[in-house]
Amino acid sequence: MQRQQRAIVPAPEETRFVPDEVLFELAPNAEADIVLRRYGATLIARQRFELANVTIIRARLEAGRDLRAVLTQMGDDSSIAGAQPNFLFDLQQGTPPGPGASNASAAPTTASSEASGLPAPSLRLGEPATAARGTAAVRRVLPPQYVVDKLRLGEARKLALGRGIRVGMIDSGVDMEHPEISGSVLAYLDAVDGLATPHAHGTSMATAIVAHGELQGIAPAARLIVARAFGGPQASSANGKSFQILTALEWVVQQRAKVVNLSFAGPQDRLLSKALAGAKERGVIAVAAAGNGGIRSAPLYPGADPSVIAVTATDADDKVFSDANRGAYVAIAAPGVDVLTAEPGGRYAFTSGTSIAAAHVSGLVALLLEKQPELDPDSARRIIAESATDLGSKGRDPVFGAGRIDPAAALARVLPVATARP
């Protein structure tokens, strides 16, 4: 991106922004109405963001105004302290066919099906279960979660469950009534349209962190602080904008979340970077998806931001997700390929991407925080890296970072506060 003194002007090939909106900060003593008229813009919102220490005006340009031209002019305007586009970010997750896709159904059993001579009703992944007439309540027999054994969750659970820890999620909508998530959402903000529409991605991320039904989340006793900042018409995709994401991050930190999951990626965003730095100064541990851009992709943000822990995805054989970004900013790896997860409406599905890998790491941070509530972001990064199972080239590398997380090993490095005192 081309940087000017005051304004960020997107490079010609950059298209990830709202074309008719601008975000700007006024210089001291400048008047908003005068500046808006100067640029043919209409006020949408004016909001203070304490984390970034700025008051931002979100404005819509009148028809025919070119955003790059406006930003270039703002770069030379002494009434403007800073200006940039309202950038667009994408969720980093897909829902491909799971392992054994040709046989991707999970047949539930009932307590009385054999005795009655009735066939057990079938349940496809992606469909809610219902009890067959004349039988006991259906119990799903879902495919096994390889994540449970791979991460030694049984051992980790003997040490911590995430109890008392607030995990922030900036994502799409969450189905709070799903049995895997029910009772785990402590607070919810909709920064998009106020509709709190459930969505596959947000529901999947919540499941990876706190599942406590037929699936096992990393930190089932943690409580979620959910901020919906991503909306869209597609069932498996949604996009988010800088302004909504900033609003969500501000609120999540106000709600005293100690760790924040950011399972999305997009362009470098100066305002978001300042807000993340402000969150880190307050002790908030931010975990982000490294991105699904592939081996040739440029760094994606916020994963590449120095204030976050960037997570790549691996499969059941510890091989890297083929679409994962590579780069020096990749800090750690976690399971993120063909992961069994929940979807809205009581459904279950397989999913892949650096999104759900990041959610697994956020869950691990919640476990660490339960044992050491004062854990700071740099210490969390160090403990997770030092306890990881090395993959790929010896030592840290741009594909796997420090290696795949090992929750039990990480927890073993964290002494309870009570025993750490002299």
Image (spheres, rainbow, N blue to C red):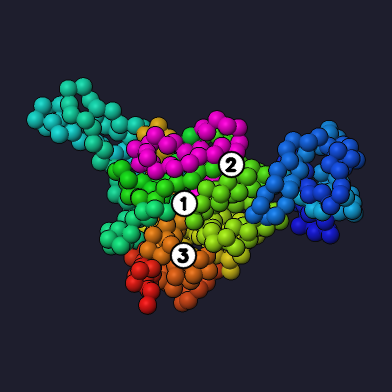
Give the spatial CA distance, label 1 vs label 3.
15 Å
Amino acid under label 3? Glu
Q: Is residue 218 visible?
A: no
Marks 2 and 1 in Cβ contact (< 8 Å): no
Rendered image: mark on residue 229: 2
**Could you tell me residue 392's position as x and y percent?**
46, 71
Q: Residue at x 56, y 37 (%)?
A: 190
Q: Which residues are magenta?
A: 168-197
Coordinates of residue 33 in the picture (x, y in percent):
86, 38
| Callout 2 secondary element | loop
Is residue 347 rendered to the left or right of residue 171? left
Magenta-span inclusion, residue 41? no
Tell me if residue 6 comes above or below residue 188 in the rendering: below
Which residue, given by chain and number where applicable, does mark 1 sit on?
Answer: 167
Q: Earlier in the sequence, mark 2 or mark 1?
A: 1
Identity of the residue drawn at 52% across and 72% down: 397
